Image: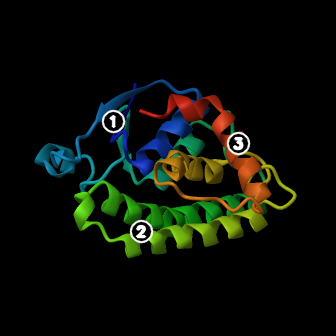
Amino acid sequence: MIKLYHSPASTNSRKVRIALIEKGLEFERVPIDLGKKEQKTPEYLKIHPFGQVPALDDEGFVVYDSTVINEYLEDEYPYPPLMPKDSDGRARARLMEDFRDNHFNIAFIRIFREMRGKPENERDPKAIDAAKAEIANYFERLDRELQGKEYLAGEFSLADIAFMANLDLIEKFDIQIDPKNKNVLAWIARLKARPSFAASAQ
């Protein structure tokens, strides 16, 4: 059976949980307590040499990094497909996932570090506000990307799954989405309605 080494609160862990559920794959969830630094133990470093989550063990084949894991799952378990068939669509999905991984999600991490990692009197409200403003700009871009489409690459794909992992944090961190971004709001509603969204929460 597939083993997923993950942290329930990690957005990148959730990204893989969603893909596994969308694929209909059975898997064992192996929680890694980041607060106790379990990701830095010698045993876990044999699985993930950089001491991060998630990591996946598929019958002895170990792969890490959420994006690489999801690409592996698409290659190894191609049905149902989570990438477009055409090369243009696949490239678009990868570009959107890269945008989420290296920009959108990073702003959430900055808020997370302030909100969850520090006592309230030590938080930097300017840093939080700056990250929220950055996310608001990203929603504007996403709204343009979604013009005339239900999903980022036209059909539901790994790109949408990447963003699904952050949706709970929008409410938790009180991040406002401008009502003018109607494409984004409709897209988020579609993503939250997928069974994998609720099933991947832990």
User: Label 1: few (<14), some or many (≥20) within 10 Å?
Assistant: few
Mark 1 touches mark 2? (CB < 8 Å): no
**Where is mark 1, residue-wise?**
60
State the SS at label 3.
helix
Q: CA distance from mark 2 to mark 3?
A: 25 Å
Closest to the observer, 196 or 132:
132
Q: How is the image coloured?
A: rainbow
Q: Amino acid at mark 1?
A: Gly
State the SS at label 2.
helix
Residue 125: image location, x then y, percent: 37, 70
**Where is mark 3, residue-wise?**
189
Q: Residue furthest left?
A: 42
Q: Vertically, is 140 above or below 73?
A: below
- Nearest-to-viewer mark from 1 and 2: 2
Q: Is residue 54 visible?
A: yes
Q: Mark 2 vs mark 3: which is more N-terminal? A: 2
Total marks shown come to 3
Q: Is residue 153 visible?
A: no
State the SS at label 1.
loop
Residue at 55 percent across and 39 percent down: it is 19
Residue at 54 percent across and 73 percent down: it is 134
Q: Amino acid at mark 2?
A: Ile
Residue 202: image location, x then y, percent: 41, 32
Residue 45: image location, x then y, percent: 19, 51
Residue at 23 percent across and 47 percent down: it is 34
Q: Is residue 157 left or right of residue 106?
A: right
Residue at 59 percent across and 43 percent down: it is 74
Q: Is residue 126 left or right of residue 155?
A: left
**Where is mark 2, residue-wise?**
128
Question: Which quadrant: the N terminus?
Answer: top left
Q: CA distance from mark 3 to mark 1?
A: 37 Å
Q: Vertically, is 171 above or below 136?
A: above
